[in-house]
Image: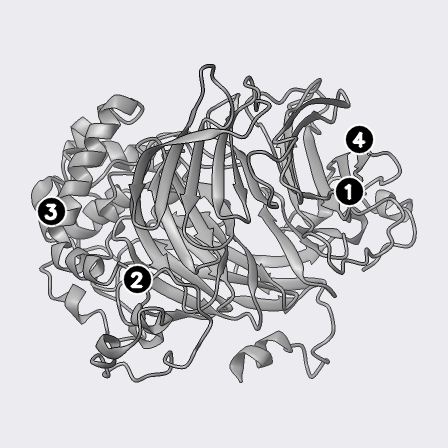
Amino acid sequence: MQISKMAAEGGGKEMNEIKTQFTTREGAYKLLTHSEYSRPNRVPFNSQGSNPVKVSFVNVNDQSGNGDRICFNVGRELYFYIYKGVRKAADLSKPIDKRIYKGTQPTCHDFNHLTATAESVSLLVGFSAGQVQLIDPIKKETSKLFNEERLIDKSRVTCVKWVPGSESLFLVAHSSGNMYLYNVEHTCGTTAPHYQLLKQGENYAVHTCKSKSTRNPLLKWMVGEGALNEFAFSPDGKFLACVSQDGFLRVFNFDAVELHGTMKSYFGGLLCVCWSPDGKYIVAGGEDDLVTVWSFVDCRVIARGHGHKSWVSVVAFDHYTTSVEESDPMEFSGSDEDFQDQIHFGRDRANSTQSRLSKRNSTDSRPVSVTYRFGSVGQDTQLCLWDLTEDILFPHLPLSRTRTHTNVMNATSPPATGSGGGVSSTVVTTTNNPSTNGSNNSGANTPGNSLPTPLPRSNSLPHSAAATTANSSKSSVMDNAIASGVSKFATLSLHDRKDRHHDKDHKRNHSMGHISSKSSDKLNLLTKTKTDPAKTLGTLLCPRMEDVPLLEPLICKKIAHERLTVLIFLEDCIVTACQEGFICTWARPGKVGLLSSQNQANSPSGTVV
């Protein structure tokens, strides 16, 4: 089998060997053994029955130029260190803060990047018994405990995040399948909250808290069936992607509390989710051992990736390797608005789909090259890196190298014409052209994101109008409405099909009996029972394996002894962690020399490689 062959590459070395470096087209990534973080005694943690090790970063912008801070949980312990990354060896003898909890374990955490300073940081920590703690590991203070009496939710906290752009609001997901919106300024009350229905839709309901004085939680979201495993805010903070144990990805307009779109796993629960830097694509991973790429604009699966041999625990985009390459930046024909895009292009690296496509359609030059890089780690102890390239993103355009022939329905649309980018170009845009995105591309970047704030506007709007409203939230709401309306018109038949298959599918069922049924056997779908997951198979919610391109990983390497639980892309390095409690730093190509040999010579002994 090709995948096992890839994992074992290296001249007949045994499969069990752990890799300390790997090479991609940009060069060699190397494990910095002296930059490893763990508990101070460096002893592998016996992780049986324990919650996953998680890692959070924050930059406090101190004067020394070394403002990165790292927080990680191992078992009942929580650590907070200066993170020296590729620059210096880790000194584990001096944690800034260390906490050991009794009766409950930390499960997840998140820093508020807006309020972080060298003197103070706000860190939220979720716990296995349902509580959420707000602590300041620099001042060593514990300021507040939320859901202290477990009156709001008694189940494990699965994910906690500050609401983007807010100093006081945060969102907490539980294994009960509920999410709660809190304000740090408000109390949780001494009695169980009473709720009033605010909005409900297909397999979700949102309630407000009914009380005389404002109290937490502000909102209660009930989403899907089974645990809500993870959620992620879009780069502009307007949308929320949730993945649940029922196997569904659900994407909500967060402020409007409305469902934008859904996707179903091939089988089993979905465990992890992330957004592309420009908000056009979402990647989810889970118990089907696959990574699934979903288009935010078209609300459909555009690719799946198969490389893992077990559950996928983390997916993440690499903002620093996601790139756009022009064949000849000066070769140009088009309108003035397009020209503005071209000038802006140098700053916009991964985001200027609009100018790329108008350039592509208005010149005969070799098309630009678009590549999104993302990674995944799994319980199989393997790290996979993936490239999402233009033959997958734009299979209807010339020079397509897609291996499947199932995009015929998209290829029948006439090519987009002209360079003005007006509404006319949207009507003929096929369903997997991300240029119709008008609903998720203006806003703040996620922390650590190297991409600039003003994201490109939709191709379905006149450019001049879009350019002037990029940072105006009121105007962008209008943009969203218009753009989503037009893109709906362009993909009407597909949306109708989706709606027909959409209802009564949300029963969790791991039976794989019907998944192997032939793709031509569409009639079987009508005779299946309601609880059968194969009812969604072959629909827009969950296309068959042969109906979407299958990605192969660029690299697929065993990098740990225990299951992997962390994957974070930083500017100089990639950070991974496994359930034994070791946080590893992989220097990017050309960055390994920053760690001086002197530091390596003086580093503490006993490092686990």
Sequence-first disc among 3 and 4: 4
**Mark sitting on residue 404:** none
Which of discs 3 and 1 lies nearer the camera? The answer is 1
Estimate how packed mark 4 is, as few (under 14), some (14 to 19) or many (20 or more) residues with alpha carbons within 10 Å: some
Element type at mark 3: helix
Q: Please tell me how crowded label 2 is: few (under 14), some (14-19), or many (20+) other residues with Cα within 10 Å.
A: many
Q: Amino acid at mark 4?
A: Asp
* 78 displayed left or right of 395: right
* Amino acid residing under circle 3: Ser
For mark 2, what is the residue? 541
Going 62% across and 23% down the picture, which residue do you hit? 116
Distance between the Cα atoms at labels 3 and 4? 56 Å
Residue position for label 4: 97
Residue identifier under label 3: 425
Observer-side mark, 2 or 4, equals: 2
Indicate whether 306 appears above or below 516.
above
Element type at mark 4: strand
Q: CA distance from mark 3 to mark 2?
A: 27 Å
List x then y, in percent, for residue 99. Answer: 80, 35
